[in-house]
Image: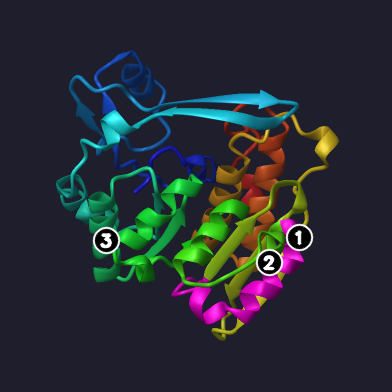
Amino acid sequence: MKRKRLDVFRLGCDSVFISAIGDDQNGQFFRQHSDRFDVNRVKVIPHKPTCTYLAVNVRGNVRYGIVTCEPLLNSLTPALVESNEDVLECADFILLDANLPVPVMMKTLEIAKKHNKRVWFEPTDLDKVKKVFDTGLVGAVTAASPNGNEFLKWAKLCNVRLDPFVIDTADNVLEFIEREKTKLLLNTSVFVVTLAHKGSAVVYRNDLGQLEFQSLPPPLQMDKIVSVSGAGDSFNSGVIAGLVHNKSVVESLQIGQECARLTLQTSLAVSEGINPHLLA
């Protein structure tokens, strides 16, 4: 289920957008500027506003984010997912974010589990992490990318106690996950905790099924950042694109880092410098 995180098409991946838009001016703008990826599965909902997001940036950091999506997304039903099962069963990856209603997420995960598909879960917000657990199918998630605060919530939902100081460094996060890996990782084979200027903590399974723990530095020095908005999505897309193109996890993480670095240097949500050459 792909909502707004479609940077992967810039990396040469065929992307299908399954969601909904309103029959308003924003919806019309979306259709007119979506020629690079497949929007034939997008449902137009009458009398509902298309989802919008306003980020207030202060010195490159998002201080406030104002989202209008509930009126539209709450009107979605599992029937939308069922009608697109033919696409999901052929997908290399299903990108699912937590803005969607729980029943829609549940149906997506049911189909993913049925067809043994890889699912990348993006929590999007601290208060929405719980939704994937509410589906009862969190075990169908094979990759997840919470930020620090979302990771604290994830741990709580896994009945794991931790002190907030754990997210002060990537190494702290890795040490904690290693101690509680059975409870925290569930069935994920890639687990990324992004910590903004502190870098990222990554846990993944190698070709032998063994866990590897790796800390990543920040993609870009703080004084060179134009805006952080969209950088996390660019990172995720780079990693997914790399995995889809049969790159190793380490190579895919490097691609993700480069995508994030490019987006951090622009006020755009996705850098126009992201292209298939990054996969070479």
Please give the residue where the numbered disc 1 appears in the rendered image: 169
In the rendered structure, which amino acid carries the disc numbered 3?
Glu
Find the distance from the CA under tag 2 to the CA under tag 3.
Answer: 34 Å
Three-letter residue code for mark 1 = Thr
Res. 270 image quadrant: top right
Q: Which mark is residue 173?
A: 2
The reply to whether the magenta stretch includes residue 169 is yes
Q: Is residue 146 left or right of residue 132?
A: right
What is the quadrant of residue 108 in the picture?
Answer: bottom left
Distance in Å between CA atoms under marks 1 and 3: 38 Å
Are the residues at dot 1 and dot 2 in contact (C-beta closer than 8 Å)?
yes
Residue 175 position in % (x across, y down): 70, 74
Mark 1: give few (<14), some (14-19) or many (20+) Cα within 10 Å. some
Q: Is residue 12 above or below residue 158?
A: above
Of residues 152 and 231, the one drawn nearer to the viewer in this rendering: 152
Which amino acid, mark 2?
A: Val
Q: Residues within 10 Å of mark 2 (few under 14, many from 20)?
A: many
**Which residue appears at 44% of the width and 54% of the height?**
129
Q: Which residues are magenta?
A: 168-189
Q: Nearer the viewer, mark 2 or mark 3?
A: 2
Can you identify the residue that label 3 sits on?
A: 89
